[in-house]
Image (cartoon, helix red, strand yellow):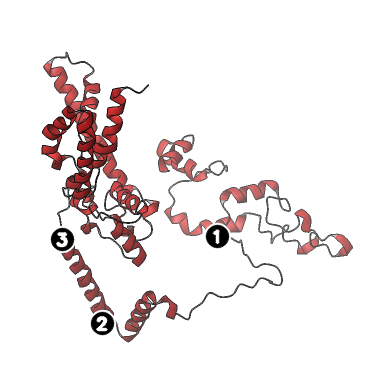
Amino acid sequence: GISRREVAEAVWKKYFDKAAWSWTQEGFLQKINQFERVWTQKNIKMVDYVRGEWLPCQTMWAKCYTNHVFHLGNTSSNRVESSHSSFKSFLVSGRGAIDTCFAKNHNYMEHQFLEVVNELHKSLNRNLSRAIEPPCTFLRRVVSCEAIKLMLDGAAELKDRCACHFQMTHGLKCACQVVQAKEEGRQFYAQELHVFWRTLDYKNPPRQQQVNDEIELQREHFRRLTVEVEERGPEAVRQARDALFYGLHPAEDNVREPEVNENPRGRPRTSTSRIRSYYERSRSRSTGPGSSGGRGRSSGGRSRSSGGRSRSSGGRSRSSGGRSRSSGGESDEHDTEFVRPLLVGDFNPSPDGHCGFRALSHCIYGDDSHYLLMRSAIV
């Protein structure tokens, strides 16, 4: 059967927990009254305990009261208990000397400090893919990644109504503001959020600037741009006017994408000509003209050698003779002529695709055997 303790826990969660998580004071009082009516018949001592121990400090744990306090999500002692547990893991034993405990405490503080600094650097260097579109585009690498996640998650979980308490408790935009800004295509600025989320550099923390100051700065910047455009002449004014007009009214723009010709005639004109690397030239020289490594047209399945009209023989062959593009003398001299005054030495690395890293390894270490180390360091 079910024990009395299990029954008490079920009734407690059904009434008292719902009262603690009520968003309004009316809902909180209603759940408390239901709790008292049920428990007065079962155990009056429980009702006296709640009235004497919990209700006098209801403003400290009931959600309808804590929603009006700036707490950054810290509404319980879980974080403190977790910190105690983490510190005890550093102490290992509670019977150490004072100097030993002090040294471990100092190491623990340094460990926490490094964790905080690493998280701040992540927010400075990390580019959240979720914040590419408005309204959080301007917040990337300016505010904490956690702040952006909290706002976007709140907007994603918004169903029918918003309590609009997030700006008070966390110093962030609430879910309804995020949804409205996304529909309008409007951006959020870092100065609209609390300074706690904008402190990514502990050495130079930002000051708490009013939102009105940021809006006025944007207006002043726009005025300066207007004056600069007018000073550049009528043509600059016309271009700026068109860019602004068609940016605000894209439907008025008559420019359309060209139609794609789905039935082109002839051979596709996709040029792939480029200056070949030393590896490709050395390979073409080693394989010889007319082979698969060169750029001649005498190899492969396109040879037209039948009927006396062969293009792979005689003086018209593009892969043999003095006009061969695969042979190296003139081309190499022509490509390296402009860099010769800058050279201080000569080194030919192995043509395996790592020639640049081998050359760098040769300059630093004296040989090219450390090319993989150079590559990993650069990456």
Give how far across and how far down residue 330 sits, in percent. Answer: 60, 58
Quarter-of-image position of residue 332: bottom right
Looking at the rendered structure, the secondary structure element under dot 2 is helix
Residue under label 1, please give it: 334
Give how far across and how far down residue 291 sits, in percent. Answer: 73, 50
Q: Would you say 97 lies left or right of 295 here?
A: left
Dot 1 surroundings within 10 Å: few (below 14), some, or many (20 or more)?
A: few
Q: Would you say 244 lies left or right of 70 here?
A: right
Q: Nearer the viewer, residue 229 or 129?
A: 129
What amino acid is labelled 1 in the image? Answer: His
Cα separation between marks 3 and 1: 63 Å
Q: Would you say 279 lies left or right of 241 here?
A: right
What amino acid is labelled 3 in the image? Answer: Gln
Cα separation between marks 1 and 2: 48 Å
Camera sees residue 74:
no
Give how far across and how far down residue 96 sits, in percent. Answer: 16, 14
Label ID, residue 240: none
| Residue at x 69% of width, y 47% of height | 287
Would you say the residues marked 3 and 1 are in contact, meaning their CB atoms lie under 8 Å apart?
no
Looking at the rendered structure, the secondary structure element under dot 3 is loop
Mark 1 or 2, which is nearer the eye?
2
Q: Residue furthest top?
A: 95
Mark 3 or 1, which is nearer the eye?
3
Residue under label 2, please give it: 231
Give how far across and how far down residue 203 sits, in percent. Answer: 17, 45
Residue under label 3, please give it: 210
Looking at the rendered structure, the secondary structure element under dot 1 is helix
Pick whichever of labels 2 and 3 is earlier in the sequence: 3
Pick whichever of labels 3 and 1 is earlier in the sequence: 3
What amino acid is labelled 2 in the image? Answer: Glu
| Residue at x 18% of width, y 39% of height | 61
Q: Quadrant of the N terminus?
A: top left
